[in-house]
Image (spheres, helix red, strand yellow):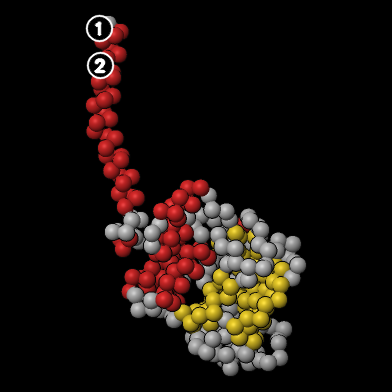
Amino acid sequence: MSKSKLALAIVCMLLVWMSYFVPEIAQSNQTVNQNFNNNNSQNIEIHFQNKEPDGSRRGRPTNRIGTGSRGECPSVDLLTTALMPEKNVGLTVDDNPSFWFFVPYKPQETPTGEFVLQNEANEEIYQTYFTLPNTPGVVRLTVPSTVPIVLNKDYQWYFKLYCSQQRLLNPIFVRGWVQKIAIQPNLKGLLKSATKPRQRVAIYAENGIWYSALSELAKLRLDEPKNPMLAKDWANLLQDVDLANLASEAIVGEVKAESRSRE
């Protein structure tokens, strides 16, 4: 066979291969993209994919579950718990991130709470005292936009509860870490194409951005507390970080904070 005929045969074989496989590849991509359009948004299964290495390996201790009773605090069945991955730095893309905690106490049982945010040098950049909502459940604490949070830096936070008007030396507390990351171009494109808030939750969760995924989903649940799909999404996220026991606890809203930022 001459070289020209051999080349022609190879071209024909390539054309035949493309006619079979390229449409299949395109169809596969189209199917993926259809998960984020208006018609099929209800078919999205929301799950958290942890993209961060184990925080304990980087000297980043966490304590997401508080003690039982301490001082004048009453005994409870479910302990104060931070809604976060157990041993990892939680990611956010928000300028002023929100943190979520399950608190089993009423305001009269824990009249004072305290939240502290520290930078990598253990310097306090934000501190506030707060009071709890009237009903035990999942509460939110949002860092003000005036607090400077630098990209790709780890910040440690403390959430403390005092069961006496006098602030004790040994409060019930939980602690963890947060890191703000930039939205990469591919992620920005996905978020721009999302036409439903629930799709944004799925994108954040799939990309391991815990605090942003949890906060957006919690806001949706507050708006639609009886929506079974959102309740399932919430249960999935908590189960993915081994907090399934808190999935049925009510989201009761923001703590009442008096903010004081530190330079």
Q: Which residue is mark 1?
A: 1
Give percent across and percent down for residue 3: 30, 8
Give the position of the N terminus as an image quadrant: top left
Q: Position of residue 163 (x, y in %)?
A: 63, 89
The label nearer to you, 2 versus 1, is 2
**Outermost residue toward the top in this view:** 2
- Residue 82, position in %: x, y? 55, 73
Q: Residue at image x 25%, y 20%?
A: 12
Q: Measured along the vertical axis of the image, is residue 182 above or below residue 261? A: above
Q: Residues within 10 Å of mark 2 (few under 14, many from 20)?
A: few
136 left or right of 60? left
- Say which residue label 2 marks: 9
Percent from the top left, x then y, of residue 237?
A: 43, 67
Amino acid at the residue labelled 1:
Met
Q: Residue at x 25, y 16 (%)?
A: 9
Q: Dot 1: what SS? A: loop
Q: Name which residue lies at 27% across and 39% down.
A: 24
Q: Secondary structure at mark 2?
A: helix
- For residue 137, above or below residue 116: below
> Label 2 sits on what residue type?
Ala
Quarter where residue 28 is shown: top left
